Amino acid sequence: MIENVSRLAAEALDDMKAQDVVTLDVTSLSEVMDDLIIATGTSNRHVKSLAANVVDELKKQGLEPIGVEGMDSSDWVLVDYGSAVVHVMLPQTRQFYDLEKLWSPLERETNYDGSMPQK
């Protein structure tokens, strides 16, 4: 189910033209979540739309988020599904917080389709 949540979230992001969608397996680093899904939006409106699409698409599969944070400012929106957490950010926000580096060393750092992200 966890992989399904991550895959569905990544696909929902990709459907709305999210940039640099990356899924990080953090099971060895966190007891509260297994996957981090990180994506970039091109504007505040795009970030908000990306996060809303994740919620809408997963809701169609019967999956409700535990919480959604950041929709007001929309420079960083977090959608929490428990063991999978989605972060959608503006490029400068993603670069500043650098969650990929923060959550290193990682067992896996790939795009949802299994390919390596562009650096």
Image (cartoon, grey):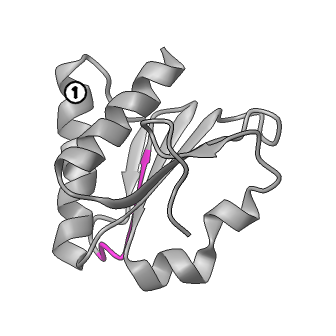
Name the residue located 58 percent from the left edge and 83 percent from the top edge.
Answer: 96
Quadrant position of residue 77: bottom left
Name the residue located 28 percent from the left edge and 53 percent from the top edge.
Answer: 51
For label 1, count other residues whose C-alpha is less than 10 Å away and answer few (under 14), some (14-19) or many (20+).
few
User: Is residue 112 left or right of 31 when viewed as pictured?
Assistant: left
Name the residue located 27 percent from the left edge and 66 percent from the top edge.
Answer: 47
User: Is residue 83 left or right of 86 when viewed as pictured?
Assistant: right
Q: Which amino acid does label 1 sit on?
A: Lys
Front residue of 105/84: it is 105
Image vertical order of residue 82 relative to residue 22, above or below? above
Identify the magenta region.
73-79
Q: Is mark 1 on a helix, strand or loop?
A: helix
> Does 38 lie within the magenta span?
no
Which residue corresponds to mark 1? 59
Q: Position of residue 74 (x, y in %)?
A: 30, 72
Give the tally of numbered discs.
Answer: 1
